[in-house]
């Protein structure tokens, strides 16, 4: 019986592990970027904005197409209007009046009207504006994609760095535990001071706290990556990239000399499209001074009765129709249109200024991104060298300490220097990844 229970427990545990493994996403960096570009919350919002812009474009187009309206009316004259007619019109006494009511108690009718815009300058400009509005939405999505790509690379790198940091701290903790054990044994034999043991205990406690913090930060890093991917923050993830290989792959000196066309950068396109929208606004204000012409055709039926018998066959219905044109010519607006036109001219001039500012800012942004990327590579190489030196120094100080040549203070300094260089290298590795992503974003490099 106990064996059966044991087997059942093992089987249950294995099933739980299998379920977890199946639920875990295995992602390379490119997989993560592809997933984020499809599923990120901002991407979904940008796609909805494009859909809305397309509907807005059709809404504007539809205003110039035939418009058909149907209207109906029913009137119950509770108290009909009385009119006074000279009595002599009916052969009565001159100077007297007869009380007469016109119409019937009930009236019902329906009319269908067709309106067609023939000419309106603002409609033509409106069509151009709707197209520009759609273009703005599409460019906003492109800019969003570039930002999401950069954010995904950074989030992915943060997770790898968090994992490596935990590995380093665990190794440091293991080494300190061995050192502390050896120091206690030496102290028992009276060959060192109690202070030496206490100093190692303090260092070990500090590393343990750092390890606990690193574990919590790792959980947050995974949650941040999930948010960037557009999925539940607690989705299990398994990253396939190796941080050392990834850093080497992210060292690409060709980016330092890559040619780029300023007018192809998305920020410049957005600023240029904004200027175009201001230009269209100026055209719109000018077009308001032009006449507009609309054609119409209507057809309707009406019936009258003193009894509510519209549903009966005997009820008479009278039809009517009309065809015509409506011409509207703006004459004088107390200079209101002129004021709006001048405001539009000022807005266009402001857009020109902003476009030139964007041009200069983009040039500076690319140069700055290249400088920071180059510095991150240099810092990475320096950090690797410094870590090797710190490891050698710490190893020598550890040997001297246990041989009784140096003090615990000397060992502490060497250990702290080693731990600092370890963190410096991790930060340098992350900087290479993030600064390359920033440079690629500045150059509008898309996913291959």
Image: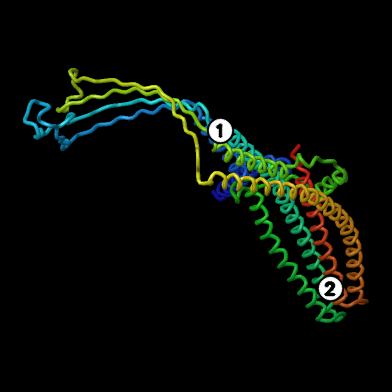
SS at mark 2 in the image: helix
310 vs 13, nearest the viewer: 310
| Separation of residues labelled 2 and 1 (CA atoms) | 81 Å
Query: Which residue carries the number 1 mark?
Result: 121
In the shown orientation, is residue 191 left or right of residue 28?
right
Q: Nearer the viewer, mark 2 or mark 1?
A: 1
Work out which residue is located at the far left of the displayed protein and give it: 93
Occupied quadrant, residue 27:
top right
- Tell me how the rendering is colored: rainbow
Above or below, 378 against 345 in this view is below
- Binning the other alpha carbons within 10 Å of mark 2 as few (below 14), some (14 to 19) or many (20 upward) gives some
| Relative depth, front residue between 360 and 169 | 360
Residue 258 position (above or below residue 185) = above
Q: Where residue 37 sits in the image (x, y, percent)?
A: 66, 41
- Can you identify the residue that label 2 sits on? 412
Residue placed furthest toward the front:
94
Above or below: residue 126 compared with residue 3: above
Image point 93% across, 76% down: which residue? 405
Q: Which residue is rendered at x = 33% and y = 30% of the image?
A: 71
In this rendering, the answer to whether 234 lies above or below 206 is above
Q: Quadrant of the C terminus?
A: top right
Residue 261 badge? none
Q: Residue 381's quadrant in the figure?
A: bottom right
User: Residue 23: where, in percent of width, then height?
Assistant: 61, 43
Residue at the extreme top? 313
Residue found 68% across the figure and 47% down from its top: 349
- Where in the figure is residue 422, as x and y percent of width and height? 82, 61
Q: Secondary structure at mark 1?
A: helix
Q: Left of 257 or right of it: where is 53?
A: left
- Snapshot quadrant of residue 320: top left
């Amino acid at each position: 019986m106990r064996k059966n229970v044991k087997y059942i427990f093992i089987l249950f545990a294995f099933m739980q592990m299998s379920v977890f493994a199946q639920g875990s996403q295995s992602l390379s960096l490119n997989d993560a970027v592809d997933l984020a570009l499809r599923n990120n919350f901002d991407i979904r919002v940008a796609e909805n904005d494009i859909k809305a812009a397309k509907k807005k474009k059709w809404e504007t187009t539809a205003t110039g197409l035939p418009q058909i309206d149907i209207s109906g009316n029913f009137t119950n004259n509770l108290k009909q209007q009385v009119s006074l007619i000279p009595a002599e019109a009916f052969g009565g006494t001159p100077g007297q009046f007869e009380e007469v009511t016109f119409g019937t108690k009930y009236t019902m009718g329906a009319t269908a009207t067709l309106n067609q815009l023939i000419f309106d300058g603002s409609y033509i400009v409106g069509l151009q504006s709707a197209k520009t509005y759609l273009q703005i939405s599409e460019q906003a999505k492109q800019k969003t994609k570039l930002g999401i790509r950069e954010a995904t690379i950074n989030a992915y790198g943060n997770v790898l760095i968090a994992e490596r940091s935990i590995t380093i701290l665990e190794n440091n903790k293991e080494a300190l535990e061995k050192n502390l054990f050896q120091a206690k044994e030496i102290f028992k034999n009276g060959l060192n001071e109690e202070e030496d043991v206490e100093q190692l205990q303090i260092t070990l406690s500090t590393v343990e706290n750092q390890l606990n913090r690193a574990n919590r930060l790792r959980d947050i890093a995974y949650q941040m990556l999930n948010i960037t991917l557009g999925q539940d923050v607690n989705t299990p993830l398994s990253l396939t990239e190796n941080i050392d290989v990834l850093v080497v792959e992210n060292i690409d000196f060709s980016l330092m000399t890559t040619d780029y066309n300023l007018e192809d950068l998305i920020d410049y396109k957005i600023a240029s499209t904004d200027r175009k929208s201001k230009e269209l606004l100026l055209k719109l204000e000018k077009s308001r001074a032009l006449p507009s012409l609309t054609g119409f055709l209507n057809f309707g039926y009406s019936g009258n009765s003193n009894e509510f018998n519209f549903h009966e066959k005997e009820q008479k219905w009278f039809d009517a129709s009309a065809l015509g044109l409506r011409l509207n010519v703006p004459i004088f607006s107390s200079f209101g249109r002129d004021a709006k036109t001048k405001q539009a001219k000022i807005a266009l001039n402001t857009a020109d200024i902003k476009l030139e500012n964007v041009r200069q800012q983009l040039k500076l942004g690319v140069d700055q991104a290249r400088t920071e990327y180059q510095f991150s590579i240099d810092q990475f190489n320096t950090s690797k060298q410094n870590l090797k030196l710190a490891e050698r120094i710490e190893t020598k100080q550890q040997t001297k300490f246990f041989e009784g040549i140096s003090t615990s203070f000397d060992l502490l300094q060497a250990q702290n220097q080693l731990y600092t260089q370890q963190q410096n290298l991790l930060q340098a590795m992350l900087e290479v990844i993030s600064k390359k992503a920033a440079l690629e974003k500045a150059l509008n490099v898309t996913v291959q």
